[in-house]
Image (cartoon, grey):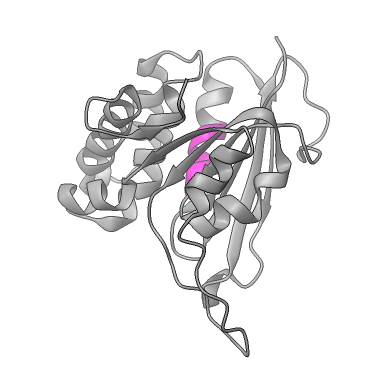
Amino acid sequence: MAVTNVLIAGVGGQGAILASELLAMVAIDAGNDVKQGEFHGVAQRGGAVFSHVRFGDHVYSPMTPRGHVDYLLALEKLEALRYAHFVKPGGTVIVNDHKVEPIRVGDQRPYPDEAIDFLRSKGFNVVAISATEKAVELGNHRAANVVLLGALAESLDIPPEVWQNTLRRRMPDRLLSLNQQAFTAGRSLCRGEEGPRKAAE
């Protein structure tokens, strides 16, 4: 089995590390060798947070080289741009169509609202879904990370029951139903049942 390389990126408070932990647990339960590397930076101040998750028969490093990531999971649009150079040519970017204005210190450049179109113009397979909007509908904006994991699950050869078992093990009882709904919603969004914007064929 070839190694699958996933990079999850967001800002502090969006749950990027939890998403990577869930993905790593799922990959282990599916019988893979897994390596995970987390980078927190100034997460508590709204700074960038990203995590590599690599899984397959044999994985020797937690870090994916630039230009070799298969799937970039971005919890907001600017972070999709920030880490796009890690994605391989023709790789997939699953991005939350949501923006978090960065903390600015002497930097008055406008937010790159055209980020999704720009990524598509570079040849990436871009799946843009309103994960935060869906999470809010479900009752908690923090579930956007699991909505995105549901979208990612559509591209991975891991049985749905493995994902559900991991959610049951990892999530506290009071949040389990919410996250199960978020995961299912992400899968539906990625299938086009609720109007995601995908790259043109």
Residue range (magenta)? 18-24
Q: Position of residue 129 (x, y in %)?
A: 35, 41
Query: Looking at the image, how many numbered discs can be counted on the residues?
Result: 0
Question: Looking at this view, is 62 or 138 the one in front?
Answer: 138
Question: Looking at this view, is 102 or 48 the one in front?
Answer: 102
Quarter of image, res 24: top right
The residue that appears at 57% across and 69% down in the rendered structure is 43
Residue 20 among those drawn in magenta = yes
Q: Quadrant of the N terminus?
A: top right
Q: Is residue 128 left or right of residue 29?
A: left
Question: With respect to residue 142, does 13 lie above or below?
Answer: below
Residue 165 visible in the shown view:
yes
Farthest residue in the top direction? 1
Q: Position of residue 149 (x, y in %)?
A: 42, 35
Residue 145 among those drawn in magenta = no
Question: With respect to residue 113, does 45 lie above or below?
Answer: below
Q: Position of residue 131 (x, y in %)?
A: 33, 46
Farthest residue in the bottom direction? 106
Question: With respect to residue 106, does 159 lie above or below?
Answer: above
The residue that appears at 48% across and 47% down in the rendered structure is 116
Residue 74 visible in the shown view:
no
The residue that appears at 22% across and 35% down in the rendered structure is 181
Q: Is residue 105 left or right of residue 185?
A: right
Q: Is residue 193 left or right of residue 131?
A: left
The residue that appears at 52% across and 53% down in the rendered structure is 115
Q: Position of residue 53 (x, y in %)?
A: 64, 36
Question: Looking at this view, is 81 or 154 the one in front?
Answer: 81
Q: Main secondary structure of the magenta part?
A: helix
